[in-house]
Structures are given as structure tokens and as C-alpha cells.
Image (spheres, rainbow, N blue to C red):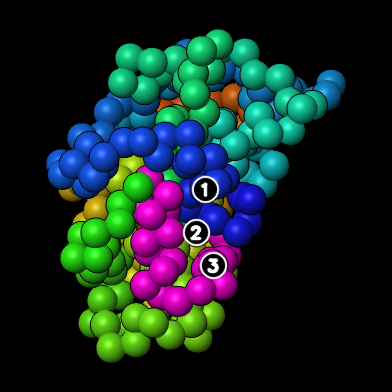
Amino acid sequence: MIEALPIYHNVHNLAAVAGKNEAALYGREVAASEIKVNNLSVSIGNNRILKNISIKIPNNKITCIIGPSGCGKSTLLKTINRLIDDDEKVKVNGEIVIDGENIYGKKVEVTHIRKKMGLLSQRPTPLPMSIFDNITFGCKIHGVRNKKQLKRIVEDNLRDAGLWDEVKDRLHSPASSLSIGQQQRLCLARGLAIKPQFILGDESTSALDPISSRHIEDLFVKLKAKYGVILVTHTLRQALRIADHVIFIYLGEVIESGSADELFNNPRHELTKQYLSGVFS
């Protein structure tokens, strides 16, 4: 159900954790934690997509993953919340450690991991229901039933997504009536409602017009105060505008990573210099 729920994968599996009470889910802000990737390799059949990747992704920063098409950017992003291993042909070796837990450990409950990672896809795909019900869908599966609590969750997260003032008088209208830019912000609000630790964006502005795209970028900058933000982008200009940290991938390998200032202004590797200067894209 990846496409149907771009920021929260396989929401029906939430039933496995529905016994948690409202206070545990919504009574506190969730502190983002650094992600540590150790010796990660990913293969699909005989095709090796990612090769021995070891990086750290900081909390409360915007990390942009850049590189040419087909280099493994989206695979890395999906590996972080275990979307990639839905394919039985995929083989993952190595570790991804979040909150001291290897998310590829044998006893890890996948829904628990995915709740920490909200994925915003290329194109918005709101659920076929009202704006209000889109936001509360995952919350209700978690066991939240109090109407006042649900109303507060809807308003708070629509405000965080910069959409409240535009839709507050039509919360029970179909989400499909929104513009594509508004739909993407609705998907963002829906994901924020279940309190992830990281927001993952897979080319999440590529289908939007320039004004809507810039609006989403501005939201990411604002939201990094509460969440870690990890974005795959094919647009260097976007990374230059908003990145705090950058990971450059080429043919499945991390060539260079570091602060945006260091990587963009003083790249260490020749391949990075060539990519940034437009020798290849």
C-alpha cells in the first residue's frame, strides 16, 4: 500500500500496535535520533544496488541525498524504513541503527520501525475520504477515539503543514477536491499526526509547480526543529537552498558526505566536483 499512503506505509499493520494509549502516542513530542548506517549493502537478485555504505544522518537537520539517476538514492531512503524489503528478491546486509536498535535485527517489529519514518512520495495520494478523516485515519487505528483529541490533532497537524487556514472551513469535504500542492501538504499532515521521528521525502516536490514546491521546502525548514528530515532530490538548486547535511551517491556507493557548506564549497572527491559542476547528471 505504498502508493496509497505515501507518508505512512501499510497503515493496516498499525493494528499490531493499536493497544498503545493516547498519552504514549500524543502526550509528548518525539525527539529525533541520529541514524547510523553500518556496512549496508542491498541487492535485488544479482544486481547490487547499494555497496558497503557507512554514514551517520544527524537529527534535527535537513539531509539531502544527491547523485545521478539510478545511483541508489531512493533505495537508500526506502531501506531506512524497510520499504525495500517488501520485495522477496531483495537482500539486505549490514545495519541501520536508530535509538540503539538495528532495524534489520531478527526480532524487530517492522510496523514499530515504520512508525518512526514518515515517507512523502513524489505524487500526493490522499485517501478517498474527507480532509478530516485523512488526518485521523492512522490515529484511530492507534486507538484514539476522543472527539476533542481528534479535532486537536487535525488542527495542530494541518497548521504544521501550513494548510489549516486554507481548509478549516471545509474539513469534511473530499480530500480529492484540493489542489495537488494542497494534497501534498495534506499527506504531510497525515504523516505528522502519528508522530514520526524522521520525515523522508522521495523527490517529494518534483510533481509540484514552483510555488507549491517552495512552500513544501519552507515547511521542511520549519519542521526540522521537531524532526529529522531526509530528502532525495534530483535538483541541486533545492539541496543548495535547504540542505544542512549532504550525502553524494554514485553507482551505489557513498562518495562523500558532510555538512552542506563543506560539500558544496570544498568537495574532497573528484567525482563530487564533476557532479556539482555539471559534467554528468
> In the image, which residues are magenta?
122-142
Q: Can residue 45 be seen in this snapshot?
A: yes
- SS class, disc 2: loop
At label 2, the amino acid type is Ser
Q: At 48% across and 34% down in the image, what residue appears?
A: 16
Residue 130 in magenta stretch? yes
Q: At 49% across and 24% down in the image, what residue appears?
A: 109
Q: CA distance from mark 3 to mark 1?
A: 11 Å
Q: Residue 227 in the image: x percent, y percent?
A: 27, 43
* Mark closer to the chain start, 3 or 2: 3
Location of mark 3 (residue): 127
Q: Nearer the viewer, mark 2 or mark 1?
A: 1
Nearest the camera: 195 or 50? 195
Residue 238: quadrant of the picture:
bottom left
Say above or below: 243 vs 218: above
Residue 1 lies left or right of residue 189; in this view the side is: right
Which disc is residue 11 wearing?
A: 1
Nearest the camera: 32 or 248? 32
